Image (cartoon, rainbow, N blue to C red):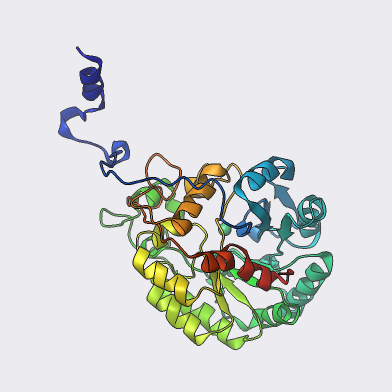
Amino acid sequence: MKPAMAQSRKNAPKGGVLPLEQYEPKSMLHAGETHVPRSRFPLIDFHTHLTWSGELSGKDEVKLIEKPEELLPVMDRKNIHTMVDLTGGYANGLNESIRLLQDAHPGRFIVFTEPWWSKIEDPNYPKFQADQIEAAHKAGAKGIKVLKILGLYLREHVKTGKLVAIDDRRFDPMWEAAGALNMPVAMHISDPEAFFLPIDRFNERWEELHAHPDWSFHGKDFPSNRELQEARRRVMKRHPKTQFVCLHVADSENLAYVGECMDELPNMAVDIAARIGELGRQPRASRKFFDKYQDRIVFGTDAVPKGYETPQQVFEDALYEIYYRFLETEDEYFDYAPSRVPPQGRWRIYGIGLPEDILRKVYRDNAARFLGLRA
Ligand SMILES: [Zn+2]
């Protein structure tokens, strides 16, 4: 048998049935490929995870995922001037994140603090949390990160009881403190709409949910995506002096809704982290969105060193090159993640070829303004 024929036999499905996980179609499109090894301008990656904190456990400690010395060469190659470590923790954990990253490499790393959710039951929580934010600011934290814990995990007795609403009044002093201290609030609320639907053959993220069934928020007592989004919208409206950066384009599958919120709320901005798969499959709507909101969009990736479980987030050269290709070129039909099959859904994306003035704002200037850095 000729080698080519043997190969085709080996790759043919047995009995004519091809399991989805084995299907890896190769595009026959003769589309040009622009390799963009460095971003056009030095950038701030507004959304990374270089430390993990205690989350609902209440432990004020952090785990450093990778030594900064291992990150810096990639940053230099990719033209990343600064990385924001959003999950910097609180109290002792926060001090450790700041010491290991921000203080050790000034200008290259910025650290955010997180709310101490496990204290929610304390009668004094609203004031305690606001005071914590002030202490974090004094310690050097530049902003606050809110994981989707708020809205989907945090309950009245921390892990049990009723879900605590995003717009619960107990958080008002914290949002106000953030505004008074000029600390932007980076807020991840909800998740893709498919995560709220049954994991069945109609679900466009079947493979992703099949691999991570714990990411599903279908059924039980979870609010809908829209209810979660609207609760955050009320928070932003109630605290007009606080700058909110809604992570993952707020609601990337519904840019019309995001635009409606942004038109109403001047204190709302978005990042694009882990959502170029969504933006890139609606390139014309995305391009218009970037035009209209060019002063309120920041670059972010959700990069996690060694985050192999989620290929769209692994901190490495390949990840950044895809983002640059999406933002800077008009290439067509390419992968949105360095992965064997598209990990967030089986589709490919199209570049939006942003002009230089918008690129400059998205790569750095908008984030620098929110972070109070010099121009
Ligand atoms: Zn993230």
Q: What residue is rendered at 43% in x and 62% in y?
A: 217
Residue 344 drawn above or below residue 168: above
Q: Residue furthest top?
A: 1
Residue 114 drawn above or below residue 240: above
Q: Quadrant of the C terminus?
A: bottom right
**Where does the image place residue 51, in percent across and percent down from the top left?**
68, 51
Tell me, yes or no, if residue 42 can be seen here. yes
Q: Quadrant of residue 286?
A: bottom left
**Where does the image place residue 18, in percent across and percent down from the top left?**
22, 36
Q: Residue furthest front?
A: 356
Which sits in the foreground, 124 or 202? 202
Q: Quadrant of residue 102?
A: bottom right
Which sits in the foreground, 312 or 156? 312
Q: What residue is rendered at 39% in x and 56% in y?
A: 330
Q: Quadrant of the N terminus?
A: top left
Which sits in the foreground, 31 or 18? 31
**Where does the image place residue 303, in percent across and percent down from the top left?**
57, 51
Q: What residue is rendered at 37% in x and 42% in y?
A: 341
Left or right of 217 in this view: 93: right
Tell me, yes or no, if residue 166 can be seen here. no
Left or right of 190 in this view: 171: right
Which quadrant of the render holds ligand 1?
Answer: bottom right
**Where does the image place residue 133, in percent across and percent down from the top left?**
76, 72
Q: What residue is rendered at 47% in x and 49% in y?
A: 322
- Figure disc tally: 0
